[in-house]
Image (cartoon, rainbow, N blue to C red):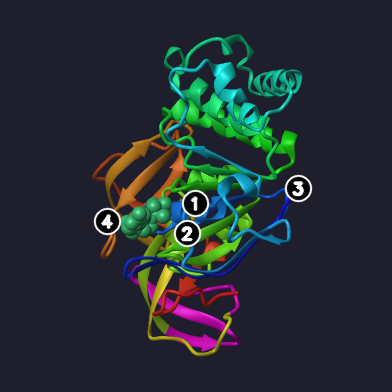
Amino acid sequence: MADISIENLNKSYGKTQVIRDFSLNIKSQSFTTLVGPSGCGKSTLLRMIAGLEIITSGNISIDGSLVNDLSPKERNIAMVFQSYALYPHMTVFDNMAFGLKLEKRPKEEIQDRVQEAARILQIEQYLQRKPKQLSGGQRQRVAIGRAITRKPKVFLFDEPLSNLDAALRVQMRIELAKLHEHLDTTMVYVTHDQTEAMTLSSEIVVLDQGEISQQGEPLDLYNKPNNTFVAGFIGSPKMNLIPAKFLSNSSNQVEINTLGSNFTLPKKLKDKNIDAELIFGIRPEDMHLGSDNDYHWQSKVFVTEKLGSSTFIYLEGEKEPIVIEVTGDATIKVGDLVKIKLDLEKTHLFNSQNLSILE
Ligand code: ADP
């Protein structure tokens, strides 16, 4: 059990600053995911928590103690990498026992801890194999097993599932969730995959160019993105972000023009000052097929993606295509003109600085 406190952290490589005045409290026993596009600084941040990267300025504390000057070994953390980082010439058992042997633990204790980790991860039958005799998924289990045997205060995961195929990724995702439940240890997880972030985390921190764009519980970020960056990043396919014009504002409700029609949005405005040019946001599942006399907008279908349970329909929009989600049995073809009805209760509105302006 340990919380992690990061205060005013900065990191520069030469003249390039990659982490900017970054402060974050990671709760004890949470599963906190750092998510964001490639290059936003996730790995750098994780490596600074691990002690693998020197910090330029700021403080990192684990369990109330400042660790800025502690070596990785002294921080009582374990890190699992995308590349597994196993010793190829050692058996699975020896790979998992390696850290404990270095710590000169008694033989029986090493035996017990490795067996226990192997049992949790269901790799007991592979203990005498070498890594190259294992599949990618099994190797990643060994790497996780090696982390478990050390009974760390904190687990750090750096894109651990990226090298696995899609089916195995889903399976390992479920196992990581089970592992977190079982071990009740603080886990910090880095990924660029918003699905992994949504499904695994108790807390998500969305990073944009070395800064926090928004943090919160997965569904809070999904339902109430603070800005267009988070709105576009969390959710797949992403939220439709469509240019809109401000028309009027009465009793704190706003009327806008978008998709060729005027709409009064049922949600309250946060602030009375409104830009003339706005961005209207609506998720694919909040746009439905309308009927001949009950619809808001119509457009031509140019692509359909049939997933079985649902179908994504791409429609010609003003600037960018607009995607809507319909049930898998909908009979819609490329070239069809479809009528769309919006669920106005589920809409979002952003100002010219890309910030959400609805409550
Ligand atoms: P992410 O994990 O989000 O993909 P990284 O933390 O790996 O991002 O990198 C953040 C930024 O820092 C990137 O622009 C990357 O090019 C830069 N960077 C990372 N490591 C180094 C390094 N050792 N030297 C110089 N620049 C680096």
Residue that label 2 marks: 54
How packed mark 2 is, by other alpha carbons closer than 10 Å (few <14, some 14-19, many 20 or more), is: some
- In the image, 99 versus 300, the foreground residue is 99
Total tally of numbered discs in the picture:
4
Between the residue at mark 2 and the residue at mark 3, the CA separation in whole angstroms equals: 25 Å
Dot placed on the residue nearer the N-terminal end, 2 or 3: 3
Q: Residue at x 41, y 83 (%)?
A: 246
Asked if 304 appears above or below 261 in the picture, the reply is above
Residue that label 1 marks: 47
Q: Residue at x 47, y 31 (%)?
A: 84
- In the image, 178 versus 56, the foreground residue is 56
For the residues carrying marks 2 and 1, which lies nearer the camera in this image? Answer: 2
Q: Which residues are magenta?
A: 247-268
Give the quarter of the figure containing the C terminus: bottom right
Magenta region includes residue 257: yes
Q: Amino acid at mark 3?
A: Met
Between the residue at mark 4 and the residue at mark 1, the CA separation in whole angstroms equals: 44 Å
Check disc 1 and report its element: helix, strand or loop.
helix
Q: Amino acid at mark 1?
A: Arg
Q: Amino acid at mark 4?
A: Glu
How packed mark 4 is, by other alpha carbons closer than 10 Å (few <14, some 14-19, many 20 or more), is: some
- In the image, 11 versus 186, the foreground residue is 11
Residue that label 3 marks: 1
